[in-house]
Image (spheres, rainbow, N blue to C red):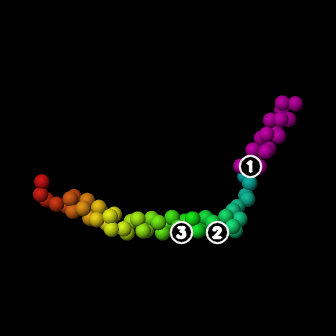
Amino acid sequence: MMENKMRALTARLTLLAVGEEGMSTAEYAIGTIAAAAFGAVLYSVVTGDSIVTALTNIIDKALSTAV
């Protein structure tokens, strides 16, 4: 009896591990929109004045020869 339960569990886990169900079209659409929104937010943060100023200051400080 225990052996049958182990076989059933092994078979079920195998099916779960090798299932080839992909994302549906709606899931792809939501994922694409989320990625685009994240890219837009990241772009606006990186190109913002405060980030550009901070990076410029870091580079100027690193390249300055004065101690």
Q: Residue furthest top?
A: 2
What span is in magenta? 1-17
Q: Quadrant of residue 52?
A: bottom left
Q: Residue at x 37, y 69 (%)?
A: 47
Q: Is 28 colored magenta in this rendering?
A: no
Residues at marks 2 and 1, CA–CA distance in whole angstroms: 25 Å
What is the x, y in percent for residue 17?
71, 49
Give the residue at x 87% y 30%: 1
- Asked if the magenta segment contains residue 16, the reply would be yes
Of the numbered discs 1 and 3, the one sitting upstream in the chain is 1
Identify residue type, mark 3.
Answer: Ala
In this rendering, position of residue 16 left or right of residue 53: right
The residue singled out by tag 2 in the image is 29
Crowdedness of circle 1 by 10 Å Cα count: few (<14), some, many (20+)?
few
Task: Report the disc number at residue 16.
Answer: 1
Q: Position of residue 8 (x, y in %)?
A: 82, 40
* Pointer 3 residue: 36
